[in-house]
């Protein structure tokens, strides 16, 4: 049909597309409109498209507001963590200090800004990789990919709204967990780790499509896909060895290792290297001067036969540093067999590499590494190879690793019994029964064959550790097991004890709790976990010692199993890698908030490496020690003189000792004596005419039996050493000369220890930094103030800068702000002649 106005209509619609209805009514009779068969309802489609644009814009703004609000919530929680007790003031609309209010605004702004930036970057990154991962929620819509992924990633910020729950600590203290408990810090860590994993996991995706080896089990990954994660793991292992090997060596060379247990371990290694297998001199913690007889480590049932393999190396290099390096090397290298096992379990090299890195960043592993030397700390290396051998059906390797693991310490038998139960739970009956029989047989042989033989030759265990820690349940292992079976309430009571629950959190929270998703595999850790928690020793029930070392690989293997058994994680590489990244970030964040080692926020190199005149004095005095004398020394000096047959922990063995090695410095380790008992014993020893001073350097004293005794010289040296404690020099400060009345100011002050002894803010008579408010005439306006702790022991010639929280007086006027150090319950430094730091301050409204 001929349409004479069609060209005009087309041109008009081109210029004014929305005017078509008006044009139709103008040129056509009433009730009729002109329609073209090839343009059906074009104006409806255009209106729908415009509405879709507004809808997409609203969805984007909605996601943006969600992300910003979540970031602000995280900032609020972190502000409350940084400045405790301020959130209740904010909630009750009380007046905040201007400083805290400005910090709150800063935390909110930075939290929201960082959250939005990370969100946009993650969305941009996700657009540059092929979205082969299932996106079922968005498949129905027609939104552009940017808005689709922006909304999807924004959901990962929802856990951040849980972080302000840290404020509940001011109202609720379960099991006595106060506002400073680490339990509340975990409330911050886990949501933050989850969100960071969501926004960072897109940067791990590099493939345009899913690799063939993920969709086809007959195709193996290429060498590049395998080598790249392995290279990352190797770099992580080398970094671990460099950091913790260096810290272990620095700590020992700075005379901060201890007689218990590096001293006894070095002595046992030295004796074994010279044909006296596992002999050592017991170091009881009782303050007795009697000399204990030579004993053997087999009498306590520990069965540390791994020393037989270490002894040849110790014969070549008789230094405790060798033991520390071996321990660090095996702990770091245990990540490699774990990586191989993770790769087999998860079918992903990238996921396995993330889990291996998380293992290297695991805080309990760091505590094991830095707790001197213990043979049980070598067990994770062999247990990791056992896990790898079990998933690859290499049973000869499995048996060899099992034997070497049992040789580390009898505690490993409990870990292997748990491993056997886990295998049987997964219907691996043959390997499970073999492992269980080996563990039970070794345990029985140790306590009913080896211990009686060693006891008949060396006498009973002088320390009686088994009876000391488990005597309340029975005298023998069978009696202990029978008692616990008859009293199940004892086991249930472990979960009502604050310290025991704290240990469980410290074990599982650094892996984000993911290991709990594989409860069947967690059976592997139960036996040794119960043994350590039941022990009547606070030190054995904490992750800050070495006792949990054998079960650490099992916890991470449980996390790998959890990733495998979850169908959504196994099929979807995005979420599988995201879960592994979440575990890694949890381990790193736990380390940041809690660790005294890298990457902890409280890490100070001065806690491990110190090279001052005091350390030089110790090295000088050690040159006077006779190589084979019977010596009684302080805890931090014993490891450096451990290569001898008769070695005692002061004051033990004074009746038999030929030499006594002391460090009178305030920061020296005095265990097993307290402050008063130690100096009472030292005073009596220095007055004993049987001992004379061979060397006295900066408070480090070597006494020898039969050496000339000069009481006057000893008294003069002692007096000069004690009087020099209170010397210091102020270096710098940032005190404002004008303050608002009643406001809070963090003032940075720097000073140097110019005295003869070190200062520390722990033990008896700790040293703190404080301030006073005085009038210009010297009258006291405010004497007491908040004490500021020293972050580490400050030795002579060392300097330190601290932030002192200063609150200005409420009254306007001119004042003198005086900074000083105080030795609690003793003297202010100014009272002993040290100059205080006086600053003139004008307080205004």
Image (cartoon, rainbow, N blue to C red):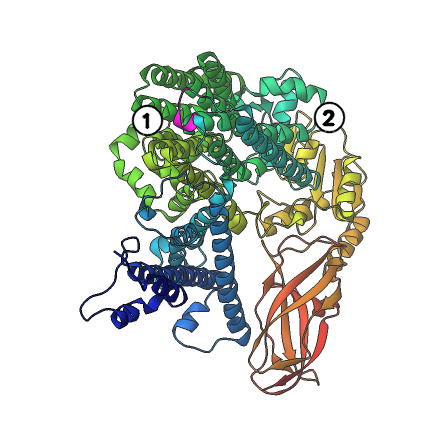
The structure residue drawn at horizontal position 67% and vertical position 36%, both measured from the top left corner, is 249
Residue 627 position in % (x across, y down): 75, 27
Is 473 rendered above or below residue 103? above
Q: Which label is found at residue 380? A: none
Query: Mark 1, residues whose alpha carbon is within 10 Å: few (<14), some, or many (≥20)?
Result: few
The structure residue drawn at horizontal position 61% and vertical position 29%, both measured from the top left corner, is 329
In the current view of this chain or complex, which residue is farthest to the top? Answer: 396
Is residue 811 rendered to the left or right of residue 456? right
Q: Nearer the viewer, residue 595 or 452?
A: 595
Residue 770 position in % (x across, y down): 62, 68
User: Gap between marks 1 and 2, in whole Å?
Assistant: 43 Å
* Quarter of the image that includes the N terminus: bottom left
Query: Mark 2, residues whose alpha carbon is within 10 Å: few (<14), some, or many (≥20)?
Result: few
The structure residue drawn at horizontal position 40% and vertical position 59%, both measured from the top left corner, is 60
Q: Nearer the viewer, residue 93 or 108?
A: 108
Residue span colored magenta: 213-218
- Residue 384 within the magenta-colored segment of the rendering: no
- Residue that label 2 marks: 628
């Amino acid at each position: 049909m001929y349409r004479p106005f069609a060209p005009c209509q087309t041109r008009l619609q081109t210029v004014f597309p929305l005017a078509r209805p008006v044009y139709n009514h103008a040129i056509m009779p009433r009730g009729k409109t002109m329609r073209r068969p090839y343009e059906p309802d074009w104006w409806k489609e255009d209106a729908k498209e415009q509405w879709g644009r507004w809808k997409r814009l609203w969805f984007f703004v909605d996601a943006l507001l969600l992300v910003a609000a979540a970031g602000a919530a995280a900032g609020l929680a972190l502000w409350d963590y940084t400045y405790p007790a301020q959130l209740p003031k904010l909630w009750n609309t009380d007046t905040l200090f201007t400083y805290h209010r400005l910090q709150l605004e800063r935390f909110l702004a930075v939290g929201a800004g960082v959250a939005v930036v990370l969100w946009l970057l993650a969305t941009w990154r996700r657009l540059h990789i092929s979205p082969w991962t299932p996106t079922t929620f968005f498949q129905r819509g027609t939104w552009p990919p940017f808005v689709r992924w922006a909304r999807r990633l924004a959901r990962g910020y929802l856990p951040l709204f849980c972080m302000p729950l840290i404020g509940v600590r001011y109202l609720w203290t379960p099991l006595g967990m106060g506002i400073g408990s680490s339990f509340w810090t975990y409330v911050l860590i886990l949501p933050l780790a989850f969100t960071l994993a969501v926004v960072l996991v897109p940067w791990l995706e590099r493939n345009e499509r899913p690799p063939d080896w993920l969709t086809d089990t007959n195709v193996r990954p290429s060498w590049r896909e395998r080598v790249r994660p392995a290279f990352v793991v190797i770099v992580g292992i080398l970094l671990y060895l460099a950091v913790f090997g260096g810290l272990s060596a620095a700590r020992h060379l700075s005379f901060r290792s201890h007689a218990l247990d590096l001293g006894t371990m070095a002595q046992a290694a030295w004796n074994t290297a010279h044909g006296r297998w596992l002999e050592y001199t017991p170091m009881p913690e009782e303050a007795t001067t009697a000399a204990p007889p030579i004993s053997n480590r087999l009498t306590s049932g520990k069965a540390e036969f791994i020393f037989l393999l270490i002894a040849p190396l110790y014969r070549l290099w008789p230094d405790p540093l060798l033991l520390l390096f071996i321990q660090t090397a095996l702990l770091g290298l245990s990540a490699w067999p774990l990586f191989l096992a993770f790769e087999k379990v998860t079918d992903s090299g990238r996921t396995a590499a993330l889990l291996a890195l998380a293992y290297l960043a695991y805080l309990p592993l760091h505590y094991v590494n830095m707790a001197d030397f213990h043979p049980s700390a070598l067990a994770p290396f062999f247990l990791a190879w056992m896990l790898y051998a079990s998933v690859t059906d290499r049973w000869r390797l499995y048996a060899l690793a099992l034997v070497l693991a049992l040789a580390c310490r009898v505690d490993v038998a409990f870990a292997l019994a748990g491993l056997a139960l886990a295998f049987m739970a997964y219907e691996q009956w043959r390997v499970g029964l073999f492992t269980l029989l080996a563990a039970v047989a070794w345990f029985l042989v140790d306590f009913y064959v080896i211990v009686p033989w060693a006891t008949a030759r060396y006498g009973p265990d002088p320390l009686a550790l088994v009876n000391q820690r488990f005597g309340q349940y029975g005298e023998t292992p069978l009696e202990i097991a029978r008692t616990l079976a008859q009293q199940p309430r004892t086991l249930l009571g472990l979960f009502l004890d604050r310290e025991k629950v704290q240990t469980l959190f410290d074990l599982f929270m650094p892996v984000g709790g993911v290991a709990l998703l594989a409860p069947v595999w967690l059976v592997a850790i139960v036996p040794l976990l119960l043994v350590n928690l039941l022990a009547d020793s606070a030190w054995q029930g904490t992750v800050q010692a070495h006792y949990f070392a054998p079960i650490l690989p099992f916890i991470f293997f449980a996390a790998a199993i959890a990733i495998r058994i979850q169908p959504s994680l196994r099929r979807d590489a995005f979420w599988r890698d995201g879960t592994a990244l979440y575990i890694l970030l949890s381990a790193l964040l736990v380390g940041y908030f809690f660790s005294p080692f890298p990457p902890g926020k409280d890490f100070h190199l001065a806690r491990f490496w110190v090279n001052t005149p005091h350390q030089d004095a110790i090295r000088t005095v050690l040159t006077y020690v006779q190589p084979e004398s019977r010596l009684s020394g302080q805890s931090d000096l014993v490891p450096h003189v451990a290569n001898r047959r008769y070695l005692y922990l002061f004051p033990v063995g004074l009746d038999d000792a030929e030499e006594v090695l002391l460090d009178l410095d305030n920061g020296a380790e005095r265990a097993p004596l307290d402050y008063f008992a130690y100096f009472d014993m030292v005073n009596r020893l220095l007055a004993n005419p049987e001992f004379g001073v061979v060397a006295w350097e900066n408070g480090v004293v070597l006494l020898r039996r039969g050496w000339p005794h000069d009481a006057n010289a000893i008294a003069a040296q002692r007096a000069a050493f004690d009087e020099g404690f209170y010397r210091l020099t102020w270096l710098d400060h940032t005190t404002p000369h004008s303050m608002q009345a009643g406001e809070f100011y963090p003032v940075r002050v720097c000073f140097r220890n110019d005295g003869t002894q070190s200062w520390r803010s722990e033990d008896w008579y700790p040293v703190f930094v404080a301030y006073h408010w005085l009038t210009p005439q010297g009258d006291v306006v405010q004497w007491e103030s908040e004490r500021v702790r020293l972050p580490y022991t400050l030795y002579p010639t060392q300097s330190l800068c601290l932030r002192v929280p200063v609150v200005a007086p409420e009254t306007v006027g001119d004042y003198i702000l005086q900074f000083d150090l105080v030795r609690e319950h003793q003297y202010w430094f100014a009272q002993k002649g040290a100059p205080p730091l006086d600053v003139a301050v004008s307080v205004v409204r």
